[in-house]
Amino acid sequence: MMKPVFLIGYMGCGKTTLGEVLARQMGLRFIDLDEFIEARQGMSIVKIFDEMGENRFRELETEALHEVAAMTDVIVGCGGGTPCHCDNMALMNRAGITVWLTTSPERITDRLLLPEQKCKRPKINTLPSDEVLSLVVKELEERAPFYSQSRLLFDSTDIETARATERTARRLAAILKQED
Ligand code: S3P
């Protein structure tokens, strides 16, 4: 039995892409925290932000996090803001292994500007494309004090193809096996 692994980091850093492959390779279950909240509420994240506001979303997010933190044998892909609210970083560090996935602001921006990515993000979907990079840089700076409390730091740049993602996930799996 393994304690939960929490993948954290800014939007577009690869928490879901890498997490799904990592979970499959390690024989664990992948839980995307945003999808978990959407399923519970029967509403998309964009709609929750629109209709209930960000503060209510953060409450729902912390509730969901408490639930998954009590599970075993799961890889949890957190939301980009999860570590920065309600003492969530301390909760995750108590319950399991936190991993900060890092990649450059430019790479993050390229990923977030893909149409299928952009429409899922309440804070990005209405922003002009040429303003995304400066938002990413600003928020990364504000969030670094939270993200940097994670137990492990892992470079998640190399996930642009399926093969690269497999390779990168294998590297992370090897590190996690030593940590458990
Ligand atoms: C958010 C990131 C999103 C989602 C919500 C808010 C943020 O998760 O939780 O849109 O504040 O950075 P992803 O990092 O999975 O996009």
Image: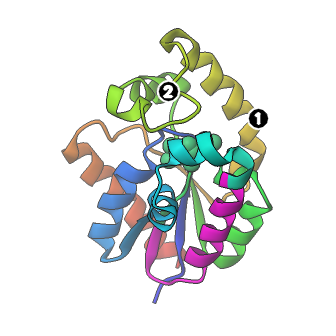
Query: In the rendered view, would you say 168 is above or below 11?
Result: below
At 53% from the left edge and 75% from the top edge, which residue is drawn?
4
Question: Helix or strand or loop: what does disc 2 sit on?
Answer: loop
Q: Which residue does the numbered mark 1 point to in the structure image?
A: 142
- Look at label 1 and name its amino acid: Glu
Res. 80 in view: no
Is residue 116 in view? yes
**SS category of the residue bearing label 1:** helix
Ligand 1 quadrant assignment: top right
Relative to 73, is 28 on the left or the right? left
Verify whether residue 127 appears in magenta: no
Start-end of magenta stretch: 57-75
Q: Quadrant of the N terminus?
A: bottom left
- Residues marked 2 and 1 touching at CB (< 8 Å): no
Give how far apart the Cα atoms at labels 2 and 1 are: 21 Å
Q: Residue at x 45, y 51 (%)?
A: 15
Residue at image x 78%, y 45%?
145
Reading the chain from its start, which is encountered first: label 2 or label 1? 2
User: Is residue 105 or residue 68 the one in the foreground?
Assistant: 68
Q: Which mark is residue 37?
A: none
Given the current orientation, which residue lies at the most extreme left position?
163
